[in-house]
Image: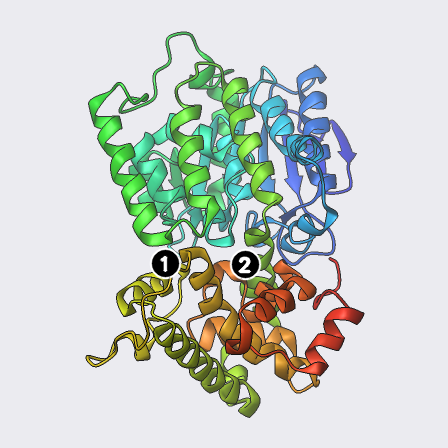
Amino acid sequence: MTSTQSFTTLSYRVGNDGVAFIEIDVAGHKHNVLTPELHRELGEVAEKLAADEAASGAVIHSGKASFMAGGDLNRIVRYYDMQRSAAEAYEQSLTYTQSLRQLETCGKPVAVAINGTALGGGLELALAGHHRVVADDESIELGLPEVSLGLIPGGGGTQRLPRLIGLKNAADLIIMGKRRNPAQALQLGLVDQVVPATELLDHARRWVLETDVRQQPWDQKGFRVPGGAGLNDMKIGRLFQLLTARISADYCHNYPAPIAALRCLFNGTTVQSMDAALRIETREFSAITRNPVARNMIRTLFINRARYPRRELKENQQAQELVQQMGTALAQQTEALLSEGINPVVINNLASAAGLPRPAAASTPDASPTAGAKDMDYATIKQRLLAAPALAAAERWATDDIDPVQADLASVLLWDYPKYTGGVMSHIDTMGLEAFVKFCDDCGSTLPVSDSLRQQAQQQGKIYPPG
């Protein structure tokens, strides 16, 4: 090796043949994850590569068993509580995007050697390379699963992927969350080579030495998105309508990420400049990070879920009692709404729209309003249906009878409380304890609040501590 330089999260070594090896190895993590340091240092190493006369190109590879798992969820989940302005969130979201842009425009060929699973920001890094080589291992997964976290890709994934494999295939990976193994990725055009793991770095190095590629296809004059782009194209217009309808049916407008990803895909591919397209994505991504849905989903479904396995929840007698109480609370609230003259069909439809199970009390043949029809806006009915199971859990939490983390997990994993809320306690926390108590009070005797819960609301205001 002619020269070596170490950064905090990666190292840079140039061999006698002029190929730089950039090894990513984020300390303190079992898998490589995106950290602010890695965001910044990728840009710094891109600058070094561009200026290094000894380096003709580079191979990016991992120093760990997998390539990269994506973002640091513990860091991302704290974003919402930071109460950043739209401008602050946008600026904070730019660093990784800018670093990857520096990498792909450095003027030298960059190959990415993918030795293991590359998800989220890991795959976005690979997409910023000019050539992707992946190990021949069926267990390797390549994908952009951010939507399942309540997020969208924020490192150029919504812009590079459709320009590489077309809008329809990109939507399958980004909106539908599909993952691909190496053979499938090769067929799709997501990667350029599948080679034996022992030959991975050698194939990547050889490509750098033999290629004359210095620029991404989308930075070349006359580039067109494969399969077309823009709603004036009839095929693309039909695809947009199909995806819009599917998102509406699957997510009932409760999840902001899928529709934001759709906007990125279709709006971003209508502009010629990749820099303009990336600005569209960054605006959407930064807005999503300021939304409580992403915070709630990540905290409950990924961070807290790792603390309490599903089996442990099922074996916990207090989780099982809570599940029964939540079901009873929903049934009682349904009966109260029926007695107030609300049509059972309306109750069923609004429960489904909220992501709740259909209340049995509103589904039986003899269920009908028992009082004169009463005007009540749909948002209030929906909130009452969500509040009833949450209040049942909150009353137990107020007397230290249950742990809020376990209550959230049990409500989502063992019952059917909607995932976008993060669970019953996260739903209350998003509203704020005092606001939740006030809502219950405004609903009258159908949602009675105990003195202990009222006292907790006055003293704490929040269930989860900030961050």
Q: Residue furthest top?
A: 221
**Residue 344 left/right relative to 453:** left
Residue at figure coordinates x 36%, y 61% from the top left: 350
Inspect the image, locate mark 1, and give the three-letter code of the amino acid beneath it: Ala
Nearest the camera: 241 or 65?
241
x, y percentage for residue 8?
78, 42
Q: Nearer the viewer, residue 132 or 43?
A: 43
> Is residue 308 something one can see in this rendering?
no
Q: Is residue 199 visible?
A: yes
**Residue type, mark 2 in image:** Met
User: Which residue is the site of mark 2?
Assistant: 297
Can you say whether 288 is above or below 330 in the image? above
Residue beneath label 1, please? 353
| Closest to the observer, 390 or 109 | 390
Q: CA distance from mark 1 to mark 2?
A: 18 Å
Q: Residue furthest bottom?
A: 317
Local crowd size for mark 2, using a 10 Å CA cut-off: few (<14), some (14–19), many (≥20): many
For numbered disc 2, what is the local secondary structure?
helix
Q: Residue at x 58, y 38 (%)?
A: 287
- Compared to residue 395, the image places residue 67 above or below, namely above
Residue 71 in percent (x, y) is at 61, 48
Badge 1 element: helix
